[in-house]
Image (tube, coloured by chain):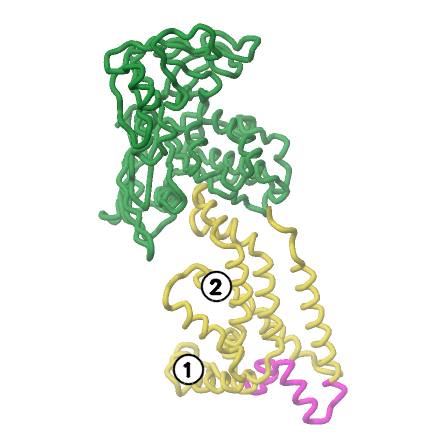
Amino acid sequence: MRSFEARYRLERRDFTLDVDLRLPSSGVTGLFGASGSGKTTLLRCLAGLEPAAVGRFAVNGLVVDDTDAGARLPPAERGIGVVFQEPRLFAHLNVERNIRYGEKRRRREAFVGFDEIVDLLGIDKLLARKASALSGGEAQRVAIARALMSAPRLLLMDEPLASLDQRRREEILPFLEDLHARLPIPMVYVSHQLDEILRLADALVVVEGGSLLASGSLSELLADAGQVGLGSANAGVVLEGVTHAPGDEYGMTPVATPAGVLWVTGRYAAETPLRLIVRANDVSVSIEPLAASSIQNSLVARIVRLDEEAGATLLLVLDVDGQNLIARITRRAAANLGLVPGRTVYAHIKSAAVRRHRMSGHGLPADP
Amino acid sequence: MTDLGPLILSLKLAVVTMAILLVIATPVAWWLANTRSALKAPVQAIVALPIVLPPTVLGFYFLVFLSPNSTLGGLWVDATGSSLTFSFTGLVLASIVYSLPFAVQPLLSAFEALGRREYEAAQTLGASRLDAFASVVVPLALPGFLSAAVLSFAHTLGEFGVVLMVGGNIPGETRTVSIAIYDHVESLDYASAHTLSLILLVTAFAILLALFALNRPRPARA
């Protein structure tokens, strides 16, 4: 799988952005970092909106920036769509003409038509409205539709949900998941909310203080969450699977994963590709099978190693049929149970704690 | 019967000045709204000078720099055969400078209030900078353009001191309405002075009324 290389340096009075990274050329790449870490600035460099930035960036073989060679495409010629934090709709145009603005000016074959985009974002009833008469959530959906209609090679989203309240966020996230699943367009999704990124991203870039802290696939970075700035509480593994039966009468669905069948909450149709995130905090182990337990998922696992952590806990790395799981347990429990590498244990995963997200139908980016 | 020639000349001067000013003031105001250059403050000060300087001072400098004996005035005479001072062209030049702040300031305020958000968004949607400006910034900043047009028109219409210094009093060429009124009063022809003054008063009121009516605050943006 190809990737886009981006190298940028931008000095401000109180801040320097200096990154050199690879972005997968398909799927969603989450760009994560605290406020002021340089995420938005980096995104603006990619879009060509920071004239003072120096560096190099090529998208699908098109060099959009090579400032050493004096080459720099204006934003309009990059074919890079941007969804900003605020919708930035054009108040003098109605919704439809906002969406058509990019269509009139696009320089590439459309990969998706107007009707499909309108349908995808659920804005068919808003088309005749004035842009100023929309709610925040509606306006942001229109902004996404408008960016897609310009047929970008790459879509950048800069915390598109940041200005919305929690309810509006929940209203838009499914649309974003749909986009991801249905459109063959690589996206970079900036957020300081790890939740959103875990829901949408296939790969992750973490920035801190204007520098690259880590980058890689979601599973690589989650396994090392504490070390790569994601917070040790988020340490875990990513399991990619497919539902192998429709949801049952209890509202649960079995998912076939490399670690075996896991029951997760939520009803899904059979054959739905899902990505499960199993956090180390939600996995416990026992030496004997648990007889009468509320735990729905118990897997036979072999201990690979014990990773020491600061404090009273450690991370137990387990192997289940070649798939890793991570369990966070206390050192006391490890000592009392005599947990050592090579030993066989039962790993228990609480169904209600497993995060599950629909996955892209376009394949996942391989590591560069 | 009052001669309406001066009134028509004033209107012509105001329209020509306004049209040229919009062309000049738009890039100046856009640059001022977006630049972080150290030149911003000096440029702003120069643009604002005509507000504080007595028109006679401005007129005096025009007289000096536009006269056929000056470099600029001499070149103009060589090129066209006519003088810039005491001519309609000279009046237009003087009026452009005299009314420049009244065109730049409303545009600058409008551009600053709008910011670069929509302009950037338009560019990421495939619009060149000029296209983004014309198709997004201009319509969104339209009240600013309207104010700039009306204020520069009205200000030029009411100009007196500069015209007196640069243009003199040549009927059909530089005898604007304010000069004509002054002349009428000097020659104690109060009836003609009344007629022209009243027309000017009503015109100015109608223009300002239209400006304020059209510039009512729009509904807050989402």
Q: Give the range drawn in magenta.
A: B167-193
Q: Is residue A70 left or right of residue A349?
A: left
Instruction: Give me the chain that's green.
Output: A
Image coords of residue B193 (percent x, y)? 72, 85
Quadrant housing the N terminus of chain B = bottom right
At mark 1, the secondary structure is helix
Residue A231 in magenta stretch = no
Label 1, residues with CA under 10 Å away: few <14, some 14-19, many ≥20: many
Image coords of residue B124 (percent x, y)? 43, 43
Query: Which quadrant holds residue B106?
Result: bottom right
Image coords of residue A65 (percent x, y)? 29, 44
User: Is A348 situated above or below B45?
Assistant: above
- Check disc 1 and report the residue beneath it: B73
User: Is A256 situated above or below A199?
Assistant: above
Rendered shade, chain B: yellow
x 71%, y 71%: residue? B205
Disc 2 residue type? Ala
Chain on which label 1 sits? B
x 26%, y 40%: residue? A20
User: Is A354 situated above or below A134?
Assistant: above
Query: Which quadrant holds residue A258?
Result: top left
x 40%, y 10%: residue? A298
Same chain letter for marks 1 and 2: yes
Residue B175 in magenta stretch = yes
- Check disc 2 and report the residue beneath it: B29
User: Is A217 situated above or below A341?
Assistant: below
